[in-house]
Amino acid sequence: MEKVGLPKGLIRYATEAEIENQEKFKFTSRMKVTAVFLALLIGFLGFLMYDRGSMEAKFIKPAGSTFFVKEGKITNTFIYTFLNKTNEKKVLTIKILSPKNGEIEFFGSSTIVLKGDQILKGNINITFPEEEIKLSKQNLNIGVFDEKGEMVTSFETTFEGPFKLLL
């Protein structure tokens, strides 16, 4: 500003009154509240990014499909979708957590290899003995485990069976 003959400090974040009275910049209470709010918002966003799971799994029944009974066992078909949110390769296995005595039949290999940032879809058949399914829609918990045997995620869905009249 000296080269053009104007006073120093004209180019800054200030009001017209601050320039005329030659007051210094004041960090007002409104600015403090806004800064604290933005810091909390950034902290919350950081927490959400840190807390998200490394893997997502879904087990959905195909549209229009139903159960079938064969040799005293009830079978349902499910479509699984796995989403690996990390950059590491994961080797996964699927197990039924509840109810017990369920069997999983894979269309292909029973071990699922999922590369980093990959979505993988496939089909499985889940079978239970007829006496195990007490309701026409039984709650079913499916667990997804890594190569160390640790549960990565779980999914709750329903297993359809024949309608039974309970007396």
Image: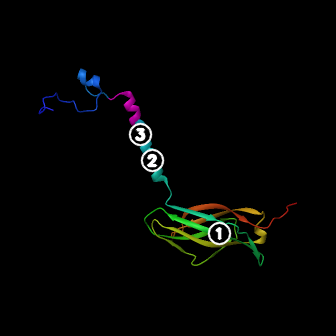
* SS at badge 3: helix
* SS at badge 1: strand
x then y, percent, for residue 18 = 27, 24
Image quarter hosting the C terminus: bottom right
Q: Looking at the image, which is closer to me, 30 or 105?
A: 30
Q: Is residue 121 left or right of residue 86?
A: right
Q: CA distance from mark 1 to mark 3?
A: 44 Å
- For the point 40% across and 36% down, the residue is 36
Q: Which residues are magenta?
A: 27-35
* SS at badge 2: helix
The residue where tag 2 is placed is: 45
- For the point 64% across and 67% down, the residue is 96
x then y, percent, for residue 73 = 75, 74
Examine the structure image and report whether residue 155 is included in the region drawn in magenta: no
Q: Is residue 43 above or below residue 143?
A: above
Q: Are marks 1 and 2 in contact (CB under 8 Å)?
A: no
- For the point 21% across and 30% down, the residue is 10
Main SS, magenta region, reads helix
Q: Looking at the image, which is closer to me, 55 or 20?
A: 20
Examine the structure image and report whether residue 33 is included in the region drawn in magenta: yes
